[in-house]
Image (cartoon, coloured by chain):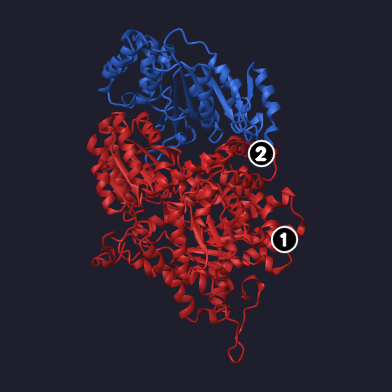
Chain colours: A blue, B red
Amino acid sequence: MSLFEDARPESLAERRRIIGELASHPRRRRARLVGLTGPPGAGKSSLIAELAPRVLALQPDWAVGVLAVDPSSPISGGALLGDRVRVRFPPGDDRLFFRSQSSELELGGLGRHTFAVCRLLQHVFDLLLVETVGVGQSEIEVTRLVDRTLLVLSPHWGDSVQLMKAGVMEIPDAAVLAKQDLAESGRGAAALEAELARRGRVLHRVSVRTGLGLEALAREIAAMEPPAEAPLTRREPAFFARWVAGEFGRSGAAALEARGGAAAYLAAAGDVEAAMTAFPTDYRLWLAD
Amino acid sequence: MSDPGPGGRHAHVLTEDGANTPDRPWIFRTYAGHSSARASNQLFRQNLASGQTGLSIAFDLPTQCGYSSDHPLARPEIGKVGVPINTLDDLHVLFDGIELAAANTSMTINGTAMWLLALYLALARERGEEARALRGTTQNDIIKEYLARGTYIFPPDASMRLTAEMVEYCVDRVPQWNPTNICSYHLQEAGATPEQELAFSLVTAIGLLDLLRERRRLDDAQFARAVGRISFFVNAGIRFVEETCKMRAFVQLWDEVTRQRYAIADPELRRFRYGVQVNSLNLTEQQPENNAWRILVECLGVLLSRDARCRALQLPCWNEALSLPRPWDQQWSLRLQQILAYETDLLEYPDLLAGSPVVASKVAALADAARGEIERILAMGGVRAAVEGGTMKSELVRSMARRVARIATGEQVVVGVNRWTDGLPSPLLGGGDSGMFVPPSELADEALAALEAARQKRDQGRVRAALDALRGAAVGGENLVEPSIECALARVTTGEWADALRQVFGEYRAATGVDGQALPLDGARMAALRERVERLCEKRGRRPRVVIGKPGLDGHSNGAEVIAVSARDAGLDVIYAGIRLAPAEIVASAVEEGADLLGLSILSGSHMELVGEVMDRLEEAGAARDIPVVVGGIVPPADAEALRARGVRQIFTPADYQVVDVVERMIDLVEERA
C-alpha cells in the first residue's frame, strides 16, 4: 500500500501492474465506499470501532477496511495519527484492517494519496470506511470519493443555521448525531432532523456508550448493494483533474481543460497510471506549442 | 501580606524557657511489594522489623488494571511492579502475622480501589477484626490515572461513582480510613509546575466533593466528616524552598476551599492531611549515587515547615532510574527518615518559617496563580470536562516538554547529566547483582497456582450469585461496596470482579494529550532533522512512517507521547497506537500501517517478555526485517544486551534525556533502510 502513497513517477508502472492484476483477480472484491466526516471530536473513530464489528457480525464473509485521514503539521510536514488509539478491533480478526494516512497539506479533508490508495483497496475489501476530518465546507471532497457520506456531529454542534451557513448540510446522505447519552443531547436535534427530512435524508441518533442506534446503522450499511463495477472508475476523471491541478497548478488544469478535459485524456491514455505517466511530457509539449 | 501561618492557625512560638510540644514523627513507609503474596509478606515483616511504621503496598499491573494473573495481557506483568492479588486467599497470605488494627496500610490502587478495599474489609471479617479499627488509605484518585498514570478501567462517570460510594460507605463504617487520596504526586512526575500541581489536585478534590453533594447520600454531619477524610498524596521535588512554599499554599487553599465552598466549620476537618513520596522524575541513571543527596534534599521540602509537614513519607531509592530497588536500597532510604526524625532536632521546634516575608510572598504568589487556574478549570465545566476534553492532559504534555527542553539546553542544571558528567565509576554498582533487583520470575507460577487452587475449592454457586448481585447493584445504582465484599468472601477473582463491572460500565480510552501539541524543540538541530526527513521524502516518494505504542499494562505514557510529538515535529508521520496493547495488536498496527520503524515504550520492567513476544510476532508476520524496532524504558545494561541480541536496533533509557538525540537515532534507522 505504501507504493500507492509514493509520489515518484517511477512507482506508477508497478502500481499499474498491481491494479491490473487485482482488477482481474478471480477472488477480487468490490468495495462499498462509505465516508465518515465531521468536526474533530465528534466521535467518528469511536463510531467506526463500534460499527465495523457489528457489520461483520451481519456479514461474516466480508472484509472491512478503514482509512483514516488526519491533518499534517504545516510546519514540519509530519503528522500525528492518533485514531488508531480509539479504533481497537478484537485482536486476531483478520477481516478488519486499519490504515492511517496524513493529509500532506491537501485541503478538503482527503490526503494527497487517498484516492490512489482507495483504488487499490476497492478490490480487496467489501466495505471501505473512509474517515476524514473537516469543519465547514472542507468535508465536501469526500463526497466525490464515496458512495455514501455520513456526517457525524456531536450534541455540541450548535444550531442548524450555523450548519447551513457552513454549507455542511449539502454534504451528507445521512447525518449521525453521536453521544446521545449526554444530558444536553436533546437540544437542537429536532431542528436538525427536520432540516434533513426536508432534504429527504435521515438522522441517526447513536451512542457508543449505551449502544443506542448502532445496530440499525450497521444493518443499513450491511444491506448496501455491491457496486456493479470497480466503484472508483467513474470517479477517476475528477481525481485526475485534481492531481493535475495539484502538480501543475492552474495553468496545468486549464491546459487539460483546453485539450478536452480529464475524461477524454484518461480515455485516450487507457488508465490513471498511464495518464499520470504521460501527462507531464504532454503538458511540456503543449506549453512549447 | 502577613503570613498568619497556613490554615489561619497562628504559628507556635517558643516560650521564654524554650518550652514547646515536640511534633510526633510522621509515618515511615516504603512502597513495596513484588512477585507473590508470600514473598511480599516476608518483605513487609522485614520492613516493619527495621522500624517502618506503616505499610505502602505496591500492586502489580494486572491487579491494578482488573485482570487476573492468567489473563493473556497479565502474564508478562505478574509480580513485576508489585504484588499480584487474585483472591481473598492471597490477601490472607499477604497479611499473615500482621495485625490489621495495628497497621496503617496505604494501597496504591485506583481502577480497582473498591475491590481492594472490599478484600481488606473481607479479610478483617474473616479474621474477626473490627472494620471501625482499620486505618489506612486507598489511593483511588482516578482523575490522575486518566491524566498521567493509566490504570483506569471504566469511563469517568462510572469511576467517580465508585469513588463516591467508597466515601459514602466508609464515613460511618470505616471511619478511620481515607477512601481517597488525591494525588498531585503523579502530576509532577508528568511534568506539572507547582501551580498546576496545586490547581489540578484541588479541582480533583472539588470535583469529588461536588459530586458527593449532588448525590445527597450524606447528611451535613457525615459530609463534613467525609471532607475530613479526604487526604492528599503529594510530590516533593528538588527545588525544596519552592516545594515548602507549595505545601504551605496547599494548606491555605484547602482551608479556603473547605470553608468557603463547603462551609465546613470545624477547623480539624479542614486540615490539609497529606502523605508524600519524594520525586522520582529527577533521579538520574548517570552517577546514580547522587540521587541519595537529591532524596535527602527533597525530604526537607515536606518536613521543614511544621504547619505544612507531611503525615506520612515514603522515599524512592538511589537506584530507581536503573531498576526496581532491592530490600537493602529500601532500608537505606528508611534509615534517612529515621535519622531526620530521631537524630536531628527537627521535631523539637514550632514552625520555622512562619513570619518569613520571603516565604509569605512566595506562598501568596503560588496560591494566587493556583486560584486563577482553579477558576479557569471550574469555568470550563470542572475537572471531568477538562479530563474528557483532554485540556489538562495537553497542558501536562506541554509542561513536560518544556522541562525536557530546559534540561536539553542546559538552562536547568542536572549534575552528572548536563554538568560535571565525568565521574569515577561507582562502587555501588558492583557486586553480583550490579546494584539491581530482578524479581524471581518463578514466583509468578506461585500466583497462578494459588489462583487455580482458589478457583477449585470455592463454591461456584455462591460466586455466580455474588457476581449477579454485583452487576444488579451496578445497574440499579446501589452502593457497590457490600456486594463487592460478598464477592471477596466468595473467592471471586480480581478479573471476574472487574469484568462484571466492565459489562455494565464499559471500558474507557482516555485522551492522549498528543493532539495539537507543539514542543519547544525548535533550534538548529531540529531544523536539520526536518531537512533530512524532507530529503528522505523526496528520495522515497513518501513520508517515513513510525508506529509508537506501549505494549503491556504499564500506563505511564508521558515518555512515549513526548517522543511521538517530537518525531512529528521532525517531519515524520507518527501513528500513535496508545497504551495497554497486546504484542499481537502492536505488530498488527506496524504491519497494517506499513511502518518504517516501530517504537516500544515499557516502564514496568517487563521489557524482556514483551519485546520478545513482539519480535516473535514480527517474524511470524514476515516483517522482522522490514520494520526495525527501538525500545525505550528502564532497561538495565544486561537486559539491553539481550534485547540487542533479539534484534532490537536501539535502546533508549533515562540517560537519553535529549529528545532530539532520540529522534535523530530513529531517523538514522529509517535512512539506513531507504
Residue B224's label in the rendered image is 1
Question: Residue B180 vs residue A129: left or right?
Answer: right
Q: Nearer the viewer, residue B76 or B525?
A: B76
Q: Nearer the viewer, residue B188 or B463?
A: B463
Question: Residue A8 vs residue B551: left or right?
Answer: left
Q: Is residue B98 above or below residue A139?
A: below
Which circle, 1 or 2, is nearer the viewer? 2
Q: Locate the N terminus of chain A by quadrant.
A: top left
Measured as percent of width and height from the top left, residue B428 is found at 29, 66
CA neighbours of label 1 inside 10 A, class few (<14), some (14 to 19), many (20+): many
Residue furthest to the bottom in view is B17
Question: Residue B142 vs residue A268: left or right?
Answer: right
Measured as percent of width and height from the top left, residue B443 is found at 39, 49
Q: Chain of mark 1?
A: B
Indicate the amino acid at tag 1: Ala
Residue B458 visible to the viewer: yes
Say whether mark 2 and mark 1 are on the same chain: yes
Which quadrant would residue B538 be assigned to in this image? top left
Q: Earlier in the sequence, mark 1 or mark 2?
A: 1
Q: Nearer the viewer, residue B671 or A93?
A: A93
State the residue at coordinates (43%, 11%): A234
Q: Which residue is mark 2?
A: B469
Q: Is residue A219 above or below residue B541?
A: above
Indicate the amino acid at tag 2: Ala
Secondary structure of the residue carrying numbered label 1 = helix
The CA distance from mark 1 to mark 2 is 31 Å
Measured as percent of width and height from the top left, residue A65 is found at 44, 23
Residue B3's label in the rendered image is none
CA neighbours of label 2 inside 10 A, class few (<14), some (14 to 19), many (20+): some
Q: Locate the C terminus of chain A by quadrant.
A: top left
